[in-house]
Structures are given as C-alpha cells and as structure tokens.
Image (cartoon, rainbow, N blue to C red):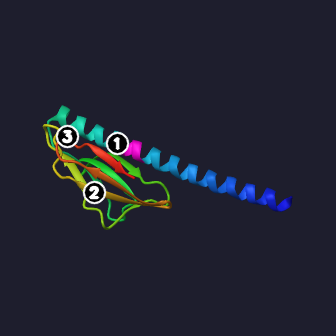
Amino acid sequence: MLMIVSVISTSALYMNNRYMERQTFDLFYNQLKLDVSHIQSRALAEKKYIKLIFDTGGTRYIGRRSVYDALFIRNLPKGYSVSQTSTLKEFGFQANGSIETFGTLNILTPDGTKTIRVYIGKGRMKLEE
C-alpha cells in the first residue's frame, strides 16, 4: 500500500514540474512576442530603427532605440539562456516596420532546447516544437 502511494506521489510531482516548466516557457515566449511587436510598432510610430539585443551571457534581452536609450530590459527565466548555436543575437526593425535580420533563436531551458524562428518581412515569429 505504501509503495502504491509513493509511486502515485512521485508521478504527480513529476507531472506538476513538467506543467510548471511548460507554463514558464509559455509566459516567456508570449512576453518575447509582445516585446517584438512593441519595438516594431515603436519603429513605425517614431520612424526610426529600433532593435532587440540579447546580451553576451544570453540571459536577458534589451529593446533599444540607441546605445544609450533602452526601452526595456527583460531577464530570461532562471535556468534559461540563448544558445551559442542561435543565428540571431539581435534583430531590428526599420522605420517602415520591416525586420532587418532573420534566423533562428535557440533557447536552452531546463526542459531542453526550444527553437524560435524569426522570418523576414514583418518579423513574424514561430515556435518549433
């Protein structure tokens, strides 16, 4: 009887951890999409180049108008970082709202690597699972 209870308890804890990890990633990804949309709309409204930069440690990103003018700074969730295999370390939007660079962003998470593709044009993003 005790063995059955411990197996069920262990299974429940494992499932809860996976659920929490998925929720953490979903929150991060949704915030990233909102931030990308925000810098794109700012570029259009201000008619100037604005970019999003992932820092050298890969644990945060910054929306910038210029070297000295940060719009926002966001930390990635604990245990998350941008992989060195990512082809994107920064991307910006032109004054007309078009993205300047495109490629893949590989995010290392406790649950494995997640790949986000940023497409040329208006900066659409897609999570590949």
Disc 2, SS: strand
**How many residues crowd around disc 1 within 10 Å: few (fewer than 14), some, or many (20 or more)?**
some
Numbered mark located on residue 122 in the image? 3
Image location (x, y in percent) of residue 16: 63, 51
N-term-proximal mark, 3 vs 2: 2
Image location (x, y in percent) of residue 85: 30, 67
Q: Is residue 6 left or right of residue 19?
A: right
Residue shown at 29% from the left, 62% from the top: 86
How far apart marks 1 and 2 lie (CA) works out to 14 Å
Q: Which residue is mark 2?
A: 104
N-term-proximal mark, 3 vs 1: 1
What residue occupies the far right of the structure in this picture? 1
How far apart marks 3 and 2 lie (CA) works out to 15 Å
Q: Is residue 119 left or right of residue 107?
A: left
Three-letter amino acid code at the position of disc 3: Lys
Looking at the rendering, the stretch of residues picked out in magenta corresponds to: 29-33
Residue shown at 46% from the left, 44% from the top: 27
Secondary structure, magenta segment, majority class: helix
Is 37 rendered above or below residue 53? above
Can you tell which quarter of the image residue 59 is in?
Answer: bottom left
Q: Which residue is mark 1?
A: 33
